[in-house]
Amino acid sequence: MSRYTADSKDRVRDAVDMIALVSTRTELRRAGHNSYFGRCPFHDERTGSFHVRPEEKHYHCFGCQESGDPFDFVMQTEGLDFRGALESLAQRFGVALELEDEDPQARARRERRERLHSLLDRAAAYYARYLWESNEAARARDYLAARGLNESTLRTFRVGYAPSAWDKMLLGSRQAGFSEDELLATGLAQRSRQRRGSLYDRFRERIMFPLADSRGRVVGFGARAMRDNQPPKYLNTSEGEVFHKGSQLFGIDIARRPASRAGSIVLAEGYTDVLALHQAGIENAVGVMGTSLTDEQARELERTARTLVLALDADGAGQEAMVRASRIAAGRRLELRVVSLPQGMDPADLIQRDGAEAVRERVGRSVPFVSFHVDKVLASADLGDAEGKDRALAELRPVIAPVPPSVLREELIARIAARLGLSDQLAATLLEQQAAPAAAAPARTASAPAAGDGGWDDRWSGESGRHEPSWEGPGADDESAYWASLADADPGPERGAPAPTATSVASAPAASARAERDFLALCVALPREGAQALAWIDPEQHLTSAIARRCAEHLRAPGRLEAPMDDVPDGDVEQFVFELVKEANDSGATSPSLEHARLVLELGRLARAVAVARAEGTGGITELKRAEGDVRRQLAALSEQIQASG
């Protein structure tokens, strides 16, 4: 396949209005120069974690970690490959693409493919026009109407009709300048065995369903016979230069955008099932064109959405197809769910019988594939004796094994126990007999406080939203010992430190990091007072966390607290600052709470200085302990002030 020039890619990237592009998927709000936030279009969230830098043409979600440039965004949201994303953006923002210099053979192959697609698109338009304008197609129109399909839906999918004459497509294509070789390559014509190899139309007297790739280019057709004595009932384009059945999904060109927005894609079997689902408002539906999902189809589905909802026919073949689909999807980023359909009915039948709303509700009530698989095993098992139950358990073990501890797992075990007449505990034991033993939980470090043992509880008050740090340990000596242990905490790669003690590993870094993080969040929440507080501290002395020190240096720049996400030096700082911004927005910060947080850091600095002085014998401990006492008194007074103001 020919390649576009690097200059073309750069010009497209430069032309993209990142805010206009992303705003088609989520609402953005400005948060400083070159900084916009919104809810992530790639996962469900209540607060905006999706950050866009329009000047860099870059986005990043701090929740799900998706990130990239305009091409990545289009590939993720529209299910396109890179070439498709490039072409889509070029068209959207008015950029002419240029191809790299091609050798004659490559150019000839590209031009041939373009002519074959042109011929197929022309054929689809002809068949569609014939369906609606010819008297011969009246029976086909009646059949489609009887299936509950309206004209708007049929036109959207370019459904058509091939006339009964043996040479209509052949003659029309020749007149348009297409060769016999091109007609054979597209599968629109085939050679006669009786008439000395002469050509005739492959599709005659059939309803025509165009099969398109994800960009909407027709690659072939599926054709339904209109007479009982006209085998086969469904005739596809033969495998060739542009059509490969194993990689084709009916309706993918129409469904990919709704599927990307929904995060899920519904997989049905037949053409009319897909048409009926779309007409019922389920616009993220595609057809597998049979019952066997292939690796190529799974790859296309995975590019489009993360959840695959199977709505295959509720017969034996359909159920086996779901099990095969689970094997194909294994190892991919596809969550499988199953729509429960009445026995012997397909989605189109059900929509006709119960209406669109009933089918939408069924799709909304889809169950995890593992639930369907458990029910399938139980339904087919002979549970009349102990041996039959043992066989069912053996079949269910590999089904249950991948399910992590969860409410779903407990419900499945309870369902199995009820069907087998066992207690839940016995069923769980029997199902887990062959499972690998879980790794033992790491033992708690002897010197690390467990929940409820006492420790630095530096938290936000759930009722008032105020910052209310407090020491809940046994006494002041324990507090001093705690702060002294912070001297051994990891100071970051640029500062040497002794080997951490068990206490510092278990409790000190987490507590000090929390205190430092809360202080920085309050600085962001109160930019004017925060700038003064940041100017007062020495990051090297007051902050033990390397990332906190880097963020403090970033936030100390003039005016930065007004737009903290601007000009961040790297992704680690960006992530940390974003979390500070979120905490700041929810903090209910006040000037006393900021001063309280600053004093907490000062108390930690003094405690570490005392520990160092003792270890090195440098003296000055008395002055440091006196300063510690002053800070504690200030903290106590501030705590009373904060509580009184509540």
Image (tube, rainbow, N blue to C red):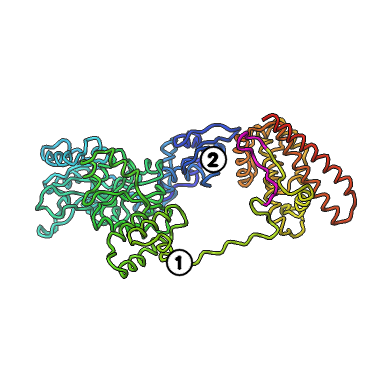
Q: Which residues are magenta?
A: 453-467
Q: Which of the two residues, 56 or 521, is positioned nearer the viewer here? A: 521
Determine the secondary structure under disc 2. Answer: loop
Label 2, residues with CA under 10 Å away: few <14, some 14-19, many ≥20: many
Determine the secondary structure under disc 1. Answer: loop
Q: Which of the two residues, 401 or 149, is positioned nearer the viewer here? A: 401
* Residue 503 drawn at (x, y percent): 72, 56
Residue 464: in magenta span = yes
| Disc 2: which residue | 49
Numbered mark located on residue 41 in the image = none
Quarter holding residue 560: top right
151, above or below 311, in the image: above
Q: Residue at x 26, y 50 (%)?
A: 220
Q: Residue at x 44, y 40 (%)?
A: 89
| Disc 1: which residue | 435
The amino acid marked with disc number 1 is Ala
Q: Earlier in the sequence, mark 1 or mark 2?
A: 2
Q: Nearer the viewer, mark 1 or mark 2?
A: 1
* Residue 551 drawn at (x, y percent): 68, 43
Quarter holding residue 285: top left
Quadrant of image for the C terminus: top right
Quarter holding residue 159: top left
The amino acid marked with disc number 2 is Ser
Residue 198: in magenta span = no
For the question of whether residue 294 can be seen, the reply is: no
* Residue 442 drawn at (x, y percent): 60, 62
Number of numbered discs overlaid on the protein picture = 2
Determine the main secondary structure of the stretch shown in magenta.
loop
